[in-house]
Image (tube, rainbow, N blue to C red):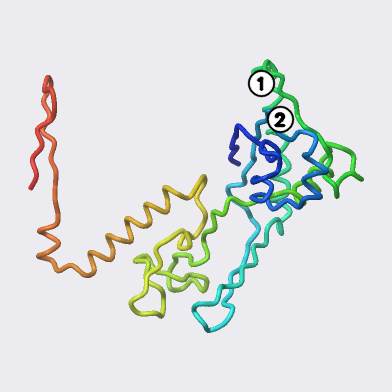
């Protein structure tokens, strides 16, 4: 579980932009957030790092320009609901610490529309709330996993080459066998750098590779103001 603290909330802009980003209808937003429009607020987002629910991606047709069919499968595994529920509890507890109480922090506990029939703040209520108001930060991955040729679900080999398709590599977050913890930016950059090295190594001749192999040595002695750098 990762917790993202924000200095704003869905109601901070009065429902002009964040509401759209969260996919909230006007009816839902007005019922839940209208009372705190433009108020000073902060948010704690509990984010699941290793969901057990699995989605699916399919080809829409044999036309490569047609968008694929995405079936996200969010919260289809009950374990994910449990993890998010406990994450919500931890986020509320964070807001009730003495450090934040000094600034008048208090939890805004307006019941969500489809969960009002349940006792407030119980496990049953939070299970309902998680299913009604959960969003993605779009770190999609693992749809073209790397794996051995014996794995029926593997799409690329350790050189990022697509099995059964000559001259094609996949170099992005989709090749991860399992999603990494945290945001995907740094891991995807790493995959891109490694993929570029693999492509260059394949196409460059041995003599060309040797010329482009720049080795930098740092000769540092105690008391030196700056290192002497030599390249070979």
- Please give the name of the residue rendered at 63% of the width and 64% of the height, measured from the top-left corner: 55
Q: Is residue 81 above or below residue 224?
A: below
- Please give the name of the residue rendered at 75% of the width and 25% of the height, measured from the top-left corner: 106
Q: Which residue is mark 1?
A: 100
Residue 213 in picture, x, y percent from top left: 14, 54
Q: Which mark is residue 152?
A: none
Q: Which residue is mark 2?
A: 39
- Please give the name of the residue rendered at 38% of the width and 56% of the height, measured from the top-left corner: 191
Crowding at dot 1, Cα within 10 Å, few <14 / some 14-19 / many 20+, comes out as few
Relative to 8, 131 lies left or right: right
Real-space Cα distance between discs 2 and 1? 17 Å
Q: Nearer the viewer, mark 2 or mark 1?
A: 2
Crowding at dot 2, Cα within 10 Å, few <14 / some 14-19 / many 20+, comes out as few
Number of marks present in the image shown: 2
Q: Earlier in the sequence, mark 2 or mark 1?
A: 2
Q: Quadrant of residue 222?
A: top left
Residue 86 in picture, x, y percent from top left: 71, 39
Relative to 71, 150 lies left or right: left
Name of the residue lying farthest toward the top: 102
- Please give the name of the residue rendered at 63% of the width and 62% of the height, measured from the top-left corner: 54
Residue 159 in picture, x, y percent from top left: 34, 66
In terms of secondary structure, where does tag 1 sit?
A: helix
Residue 102 in picture, x, y percent from top left: 68, 15
For the N terminus, the image quarter is: top right
| Front-lying residue, 95 or 32 | 32
Name of the residue lying farthest toward the right: 117
In terms of secondary structure, where does tag 2 sit?
A: loop
């Amino acid at each position: 579980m990762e917790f993202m603290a924000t200095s704003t909330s869905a109601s901070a802009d009065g429902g002009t932009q964040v509401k759209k980003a969260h996919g909230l209808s006007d009816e839902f937003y007005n019922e839940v957030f209208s009372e705190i429009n433009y108020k000073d607020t902060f948010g704690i987002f509990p984010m699941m790092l290793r969901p057990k629910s699995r989605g699916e991606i399919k080809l829409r047709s044999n036309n490569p320009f047609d968008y694929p069919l995405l079936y996200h499968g969010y919260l289809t595994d009950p374990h994910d609901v449990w993890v998010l529920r406990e994450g919500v509890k931890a986020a509320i507890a964070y807001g009730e610490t003495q450090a934040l109480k000094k600034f008048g922090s208090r939890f805004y506990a307006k019941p969500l529309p489809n969960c009002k029939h349940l006792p407030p703040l119980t496990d049953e209520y939070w299970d309902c709330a998680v299913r009604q108001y959960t969003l993605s930060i779009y770190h999609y991955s693992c749809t073209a996993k790397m794996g051995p040729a014996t794995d029926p679900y593997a799409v690329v080999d350790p050189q990022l080459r697509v099995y059964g398709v000559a001259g094609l590599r996949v170099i992005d977050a989709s090749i991860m066998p399992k999603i990494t913890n945290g945001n995907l930016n740094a891991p995807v950059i790493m995959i891109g750098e490694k993929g570029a090295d693999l492509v260059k190594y394949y196409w460059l001749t041995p003599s060309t590779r040797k010329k482009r192999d720049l080795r930098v040595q740092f000769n540092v002695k105690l008391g030196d103001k700056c290192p002497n750098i030599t390249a070979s």
